[in-house]
Structures are given as C-alpha cells and as structure tokens.
Image (cartoon, coloured by chain):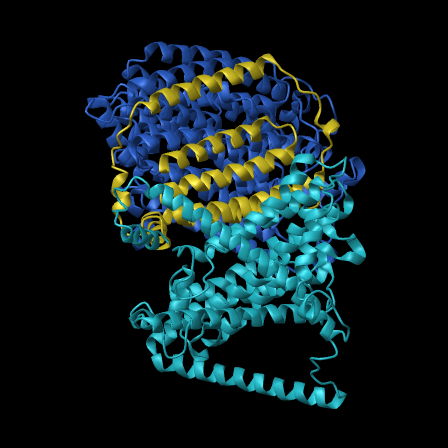
Chain colours: A cyan, B yellow, C blue
Amino acid sequence: MQAFLDSLIRGWGHDPQTWVWTQLIYVAFMGLFSFAVINFAAVTAGIFSWAERRVAGRMQSRVGPNRAGPGGFYQWIADAVKLLTKEDLVPTEADQFLFRIAPYFMMVGFACVFVALPFSHRLVIAEMNVGVFYIIAVTALIVVGIIMSGWSSNSKWSLFGAIRSAAQIISYEIPAGMALMIPVLLSGTLSTQGIIRAQGPWPWEWYIFHDPASFAAFFIYFISALAEGNRTPFDLPEAESELVSGYNTEYSGMRFSYFFLVEWGNMWVMSALATTMFLGGWQVPFLPVTDAADKIAMLSGGWTVLAELASIAIFTFKTLFFVFIVMWLRWTLPRIRVDQMMNMCWKYLVPVSFAAVLFVAGWMLVIHAVPALDWIMRIVLTAGGAITLVMFWLRTLQNIKDTGDKFDFTSNW
Amino acid sequence: MEAVLFYIFAIGVVVAGAQVVLRRNPIYGAVSLVACFFFLAGIYVLLSAHLIAILQVMVYAGAVMVLFVFVIMLLNLKEEELGEMHVTTMKGIGLAAVLVLVGFIAWKALTPVQFARDMAVNEQIHGFGGVKAVGNVLYRSSVLPFEVTSLLLLVAVVSAVVIAKGKI
Amino acid sequence: MTFNANDLLGVLPAIILSIGALLLLMSEVFLSTTRAAAQAPASPGERVAQTATAPEISSTQPDRRYQAWLAAGVAALGLWAALSQLGDPAISLFNGAAMSDGFGRVVAATVCGALLISCFVAFGYLEWLRATRGEFYALTLFSAAGMCLLAQATDLIVIFVSLEVMSLALYALCAYLRRGKRPAEAAFKYFILGSFASAIFLYGAALGFGATGSTRLADIAAGVRLAATGGGPGGSAGLLFASVALLTAGFAFKVAAVPFHMWVPDVYDGAPAPVTGFMAAGVKAAAFAVLVRILVSGFGDPSSSIGPHGWQQIIVWLAALTMFFGNLLAVPQRSVKRMLAYSSIAHAGYLLVAVAAMGNAPSRPDATQGLLFYLASYGATVIGAFGVVALIERKFALAGTGDDLSSWAGLSERHPALAAAMSLFMLSLAGVPPTAGFMAKLTVFRSAIEAGLAPLAIFGVLTSVAGLYYYLRVVVYVYMVPEGRADSVPGGRVLSASIALASCALIVLWMGIMPGSFSAMIQSASGSFGR
C-alpha cells in the first residue's frame, strides 16, 4: 500500500521522502481504506443475512423475506435501519463499561482481518510477511469480545454462552492453525498473496489437491472455521433451546446487530481464507502469477484492467461458493452436543492435523527427491475430486427428478 | 509519526499495566492486561519486529489471557469477597522502594545510552523481524534456550497434573 | 552459527537426566493397574495408617518400586557423565549460551550425587506412605536436569529458562503429599515468592540487555569493561549497576539469603523430607553456581566500579546478615525440620562469604574451591540429616502435622545407628572437626581472609559457634533425653534409607578426614573456570 501511495505522491510531482504532507497522506488514506473495508464488511454481512434467509427458505420449502425490493433484497437494509433505531438497553446489574465496549472489540477483531485478506491480484490493503499469523491473531479479539459481553451481562445465559464459546474457539484454534500451517509449509511464506502466488490457476495446482494431507487439512480447516465462527453445527454458544441466545442475550439495538454483523461477516472471512490458502485464490487461468513471473503485470493497457477484474471475479466466485456451503450446512445439520464438540476437536481434529503437518513435511522431502511423484499425486487427487463432484451432481439431479422438485424461480419470488 | 505512535503505545502500556495492578476486580485486571499486550505489540511493530508483535497478540492476548479470564469468570468473585482495602506501612515501604528503583532506572535510562552492539545494525539485516530471521536466530544461535523451553513446558504440564490430581 | 555433537556432549548430564525422566513418564503408560491388588502385601505404613489416621490410600496401585531404582540408575549415569568429563578443558557450547568447564561439571556432579542419594531416601519414604507415583521421580529428574543446565549456563536466557525448569518441578514436589494444609501452603508460598524472584531476575536481565545489547555473559562482561574505562556508552554504568543488584536479589531468593529468606522455613517444613533434602542440596548448588557465574564471568571485571568492588559490598552485607539471622532464628525452633531450614539459611551465609571472596582476583581460585567443597559437603550432610528426618517424619506426614524435638527423644536406644548418623550430620552442620562441615568452613574462611575480608570471616566463626547450641540440642535429645512416647518408632523398610544414610555418613567422614583427595579432584576442575 505504501508503494502505491508513494507512486501516487510522485504522480503529483512530489518526492514522498521529503514532502511534508506525506505522513498526512498516509494517515488520510489509512482512514479511507478503513472506511472502505468496514463498509465492505458491513454490506456483505447484511447481504448474507438476506441470502441466508432465502437459502433457508428454499431448503425448507418456505418463502423467506420476499416483500421489500426484488426477491426481498432490500430486507437487509430495512433490518439494519430497524436495529439502528431500536433502544440501546443496558441492564442495570450489568457491568456498564465492559458491556458497552464488548461489541466494539468484536467489530475491531473482525474488521482488522480484512487488512490482510486479498481480493485480487493487486487489491489487498497490506501485503504482510506475517499475513496468516496476523489473521489468526486479530481473530482472537473476537473471543475477548465474546467473553467480555458474556461476563458483563451479569446473566447466567450470557455467561454460559461466553464460556462455551471461549472453550470452543480456543480449542478449535489449534486444528485450524495447524491446518493453515500446511499451505505455509508448502509455499514457504506467511504472506497471503505469496501463498496464492505459490499456487496456480488450475485445480491440480491448488494446495487442496497437493497431497492427501493437505486435502485433509482443507476439511480440518473448514470444520474448525465453522466452529470458530459459531456456525451450525457448532452454534452451541447461542443454542437458543438451551441458552436463550447465549452471550448476546442481554443486548439490543445496534450493539446486538454488531454480534450478527460479525457472525455473517465471518462467513466471508473463513471462505476467503479457505480460497486463499487451499484453492488458488485469485489466480486467472492462462495468466499464472508466480514469484518468478507475473503474467498479469506483463499485460498492457486495458488488458491489465480486464485481467484484474477477472481475478476479482474468480476470487469472489470461489468465496461465495463456500459462503453458500456454510449456509447449506446450517440448514441441513443438527447442532451437536458439547461433549461431541470437544471430542471432535481434541480426539480427532488435533491429532489428525498434527499428523498432516508431519506428513506434508515428509512429502516435501519425497517430492524433492522424486519430482515426478508430485505431479502424479496432484493429478490423481484432482481426478478423484472431479469424479466425486460429478457423481455428486448426478446424484442430486437424480434426487430432484425422483422427488419431482424443480427449480422454480417464479412462485417463490 | 513513529514518535507519536510510540508515545501513544507507551502511555497505553503504562496505563494498562498500572490498571492491572491497581484494579480490585480481577476481570478488569485481566482485561487491562489484554490491552497492555496489544499496546506492547504496537511497540514491537514500531521496532519492526512484526512476527513477535503478532505472536504477542496471538499467544498472550488470544490464548493465555482468554484462559485467564475464563478461570476468573468461573470463580466469579463478588465485589464483597474481595475484602477491604488496607493501607499498611509495609505497602507504603514497598511503594516507596518501587518508586525509588523505577526513578533511579528511569533517570539512568533517560541519559542517552549508546549500545555496545549497535541496535541499528539489526535493521540492516535482511528481513529483520520476519519469520525467516526469527527462525534463524531461534534454531541456530538460540537453540539451547529453545530446547530447554520445551523441557520447561513439559515440566509445567507434569507439575500441573501432579498438583491437580486426586490425593496422594 | 550452528551447533554440533560436541555441544550436546557438553550438556550430557542434563540430557541423561531428561531422558531418564521421559522414560519414567512413558513407563507409567504401560503399567497395568489390575494385577497389583492381590500381590502387594500391606506395608507397615498401611497398618499404622489404618489404626492411626486412616488416610485415603488406594490399594490397587501397580507396583512402582522399579521407578526408584531407574531414577537412581539415571542419576548415577549423570554423575558418571559429569565426573568423566571432569579434567577436560573448558569449552564454550551453543555459541556461548552454555559452558562446559570444571566448575559446572563439579556442580553437576554434586547435583547428580544428591539426586542419587535422595532417590534412596525417597524410595522407603514413599513406599511406606504408599505414595509412589511416576511423576515424583520424573519431576526430581527434571529438576536435577534444570540444575545441571543452570550450573553450565552462560546466557541470561538459558539461566532463566533452566531456573524455571528447576523451580517448577520443585513447586510441584513440595505439594506432592497433599495431606493437611501444610504442603499446599508450602507449595503456594514457594510458588508465589519464587515467581516474584524470577520476575526480579528477569528485570535485572532486561536491564543488563538494555545496557549491553546482549544476554551472553561474555558480551555483558565486555560491556562492563567498556563502562569501566569510561569510553563506553553514557548511562550504561548505572543500568549495569541496577542490573547486577536485581540479578543478585533474584538469586538471593533462591539461595535463601536473609532479607529474602521468608519462604524457607515454611517450604522446608511443608515439603516431604526427601524433597526438602534434595532441595536444600541441589538448589543451593545450582543457584550458587549461577550466581557466581553471573557475578564473576559477567560482572567480574576488576577495573570496574560496578565490578567486584560494587557487588562485593552487596554480597558481604548479605552474607553477614544471613549468617547472623539464620543462626539466631534457628535457636528457638522446636521442629527439627524448621531448625534445619534456618540452618540452611545460615549455611547460605557461609557460602556467600566464599562468593564475596571471589570479588578479588587473587583469592578467586581458592574461593571457588572452597565454594565447591562447601556445596558438596553441605549437600551430603543435609541430605543425610533430612534422610533421618524422613524416617521420623513418616507417620506425621500421614497426619499432615509437623515433627517435634520430643519425638527424637531416646532414639539412641531404639536405633543406635540412626542416632549416631544424625549426630554425625549435626556435628558436620555445626562444623566440628572430624567432619566435612569443618573442612568446608575452614576453606571458605581461609579464602575470605586471603581476600582481605577478615572481619567477615571472624563474624562467620562467631556465628557458627552460636550455631553449635541448636545442633547439639538435637544430639542431646537423641542421646540423653529418655524416651517420652512409645509410639515414636521409625517404621520398617529402612534398608534403602540405610544405604543412603550410610553413604552420606561415609562422604561426610571422608571429606572431613581426607579432604585432600577430594579437593584435589575439585582443584583439577576449578582450575578451568571458563570465562
């Protein structure tokens, strides 16, 4: 980002090293970028809240919000306005200061992630050499916010929800972190852009199909991310049948909306991270970008813009696909029990993720010695993945045919 | 700008650190400690030790402090259980000793110190503060403390088990 | 930049001890819990326990007796490793993070020897209480590994980490027998004050790093030299002074010097007696070794104002205070364990005399020898003394109460050998001629006089005369006071304890009567006190 701003200042005819306003420009653009990022996060979260209800409606053969705007799309704006204008209640017995400040902790932890998340070949706010660690680290603020909100509410439901949530997030951070270490291991960098550059545009160049362990790591990461985001089937912290609403029980109005903003926004974060780490990110076919050669930068004129837009589209498509899967899971799977949740993490995911890291480290030595194995393994895994997808698709078509269900875009809308 | 940021972070560290000690409510103490760690991470960033800054947040603010707060929350101390605040002579002497020591060190440290091994040299090492640089130090010149730390963690785990286990 | 096999060989004792501990921990996994109930005969301890206090004792524990022998074997291996390298030249390990020199090897040997004997003491004690658990010996081995590393460390980070390895294991060992409030209190006090001491040490280390830009003692020494010549960075002299003061304070906690001694009586009293013995011998050896290393290798530059002449004053006053208060406070104690705790404070004072004598370069070799001799002799004596206490204490440990002088009455009639051993250890602690304690005090005070610290030496002699009173009182109770209570019988399973006590007594006598052979060994080693 600094390089971009420096070039901008040079474009205005000043030397960024000596110009007095340089620092001010930096600060101004930091503010601008933060504003853009927070708005992006808020708007996507809002749209997801609508999309989630539509998906739920479709899956449960009901309608969902369909009054405001085309397909009920404006519903999320209406909801936002409603939440903003609601009375901001603070319980008398609550710890006033912590109660008020807790949602901001969550918002900060959530918004900070976008700083290191890439959107396209060039579009990333800060390309950090510790990007992945940074993302894991700032997510920690969300736990702090949850704990603070739960404790300060002075309500047993909130406290139970917060304790469950803290236990869940802390536990699942371990398999998630270990799974993310595998792409780091393979690419030799912690930078998110660097990891994408180390992959390629085609599926067999993605890390998910690199070897069996990284294939497993992708799923470990995905499951753990679901748990970290308190999404079903891991939504124990807010299990409404047991805990009213968990840590956000006592909140109302805008502060309440922050919790949901974070939850829906987190779907983008986890999906984008999965795309970045395992699925080749924004890489455009036929225009591979590696550390050695940047095919997109080599283009000229309008083609650059076109390639850039293509990379944004590809990245967004992959991410939204996973967002859809997360919603799909929510409306398909039942909630698991606390003991099952803990068992799953400590008895299965943690050992498997450690084994996967060791396997990948060993596999890297193997393919270093026999490079041909690398390609054989990638092709085999990609072919396996493709066959599975095709079979899944056929089976789904068959099911739809058998039940007589059909895609109906008229009555429901 | 770096100087401004430094003073913001430094004042934050000092204020939050003082809060940890002075607050009667343990939850506030723990939350202040989290804040203190964040400001400290900011100072690390200013020193261009990025990895350390991130690890500071990830390990301390993210994992260790959450467990602390977790335990404190489970104990759930009430205000009345904390007892009266007593000001005793010993506390006064302790405070005076701390002030004298801190004052002495601050007075000494405020005179410009030129380091025996110039710290600025570190900046010139390629990728200082990054993963590779830290890894090189950790696994080469500091390999002994690194390995002994793993021993330390094991001992801590075993000790905790011994203390927590049923009666012997 | 990197390290090789030689580096690993240099810290061999610590590696052996760690591997032994890991083996012990792993062996716990493979123990079957089913077969034990039928074949294990009810031990005397259990019989007494059932009649007396009825503690919760599970009778379905597997047979863990092999663990003591395994631990002892590992300790012996470590001792051999330390001794086998004794005459080798000093080498710097891991790019200056540690040092394999005669000084460190002798301390490591002392620690391993103490561990070896403590294993025998602990065996009978734990079996009698039916409290043998794999973690006990593993933790003692870990703690000893920390001590060995501490003796060899020449980097403040390594010192801190090994200090914590040693201390954490000991905190847990103090609370090992959780009967009654006292062990928990002991462990808690030790933990809180120990952590506080560690924090002070870290603060000192941070200031030292701030002033010199390195945590290696060699680099700190360079910084001190630079500061002394005045050509060095401005302000660093003051920081170094604060640093050495805080570092010394941190270790004064660990060695139990007087303003920092509060924890000692309660901890020594509350911990199981075999642990106390090991703690007294091992922690003292390791903490003094590292204190000497920091002061001499790090801040020992003779030309510097903050060098020897600065810290020597601190140490002299610490030593005087420690000797005075340690002996004074030991006098009114009725519990032998508490008395030994205060006596351990007093002995820290005598050892500090040797450290003070190291401030002057000419007397340094003699003082080093004196220190090492004192550490070894004190270790053998105190483990022996606590070994006897362990035999007496067993039944009190079940009830969770302390011992009292009255339970020692008439010991000579029931167990003449035990009484004789205890008397020997008491005489050695008091510093009466044919014992190791006398020779140790002699060498230390001689080096102090050599260093021009005659007043301190005279003060030390006076306080040790005062110490005679409370040591001899135990002997008086053992031999001259008639037996008061019929139930004060040390229980069975004394074989392993007998081995331990006999070897302690032999070492004490050997070091007392033929100090030459022992000091020759130390001399060959301490000549190579690496920088």
Residue A30 visible? The answer is: yes
User: Could you tell me which quadrant the C terminus of chain B lies in?
Assistant: top right
Figure label count: 0
Is C130 situated left or right of A283 in this image? right
Q: Is residue B148 visible?
A: no
- The spot of residue B42 in percent (x, y) is 44, 41
x and y percent of residue A5 in the render? 34, 52
Q: Quadrant of the N terminus of chain B?
A: top left
- In this rendered view, identify the residue nearer to me: A130 or A123: A123
> Please, is residue B125 above or below residue C470 in the view?
below
Q: Is residue B167 left or right of residue C366?
A: right
Q: Position of residue A335 (x, y in %)?
A: 73, 64
Left or right position of A267 against C322? right
Relative to C11, is A346 above or below?
A: below
Q: Is residue B95 above or below residue C299?
A: above
Instruction: Please give the name of the residue rendered at 63% of the width and 55% of the height, measured from the top-left corner.
Output: A261
Looking at the picture, tell me which residue is in the foreground, C371 or A48: A48
Looking at the image, residue C35 lies above or below residue C11 = below
Q: What residue do we see at 61% from left, 59% from top? A: A45
Of the pair A57 and C467, the residue shown nearer to us: A57
Q: Position of residue A155 (x, y in %)?
A: 77, 43
Q: Quadrant of residue A325?
A: bottom right
Q: Quadrant of residue C189?
A: top right
